[in-house]
Structure formats: C-alpha cells, structure tokens
Image (spheres, rainbow, N blue to C red):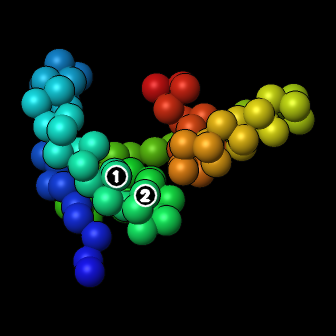
Amino acid sequence: MPLPSIAVPTFNSERAETAWWDRNRTEVEACLRAILREKKKAQPRVVMTPGYKKKFVPVPVTLAGSDLDAARKIAEDRGISYQVYIRSLLT
C-alpha cells in the first residue's frame, strides 16, 4: 500500500504558511500516523509531495556529546531522525 503524501504549496509569507499548517493539521497528523504505523521514519520529505522544496543550507554546529546523545534519544522516541529533531528546535 503506498504511503500517503500531502501537496504542500509554496507560501508568500510565514503567516500564510502558519495558516495553511493550522488548517491542514488533522490531515498532516493522519499522514504521519500512517507512516509511523508502517515503521518508517517520519521525515518531512516522506510526508510532502516532491513538488514542495524548502531550501536548506548546511551549517556546522558543535554540540556536547551528551546533548547529541539526548537529541538522538528524543528523536528515536518520536520516530524521526535526530537531524530533523534538531532542525525543528532551531526553526
């Protein structure tokens, strides 16, 4: 069975993006639950259709080993990669 995906539009402002995510929260959460039931990691690129691209710029960050271990544990508990978890903390 193919995993669900959501067509996320491009936005003109952060306010418009926030409003869209608020309106579509139920659908997004259902999609994430379906992915987690399949034991897949719930990363944004899995949930969103290929047409949605947000430009990310790699930035090296130095963290204490214990902080990185804690982030990995929390991310694993949430079913996401630790990079996605850390990115969510920074955005």
Residue type indicated by callout 2: Leu
Identify the image quadrant of residue 34: bottom left
The residue at the point 59 percent across, 51 percent down is: 81
Where does the image place residue 25, in percent across and percent down from the top left?
20, 35
Identify the image quadrant of residue 65: top right
Asked whether, in this view, residue 60 is left or right of residue 26, the answer is right
Asked whether, in this view, residue 64 is left or right of residue 74, the answer is right
Q: Residues within 10 Å of mark 2 (few under 14, many from 20)?
A: some
Asked whether, in this view, residue 65 is left or right of residue 46, the answer is right
Residue 37 appears in the figure: yes
Where does the image place residue 42, in percent across and percent down from the top left?
44, 54
Q: Which mark is residue 36?
A: 2
Where does the image place residue 26, in percent across and percent down from the top left?
18, 38
Residue located farthest toward the bottom when viewing the structure as drawn: 1
Residue on which disc 1 sits: 33
The residue at the point 64 percent across, 48 percent down is: 76
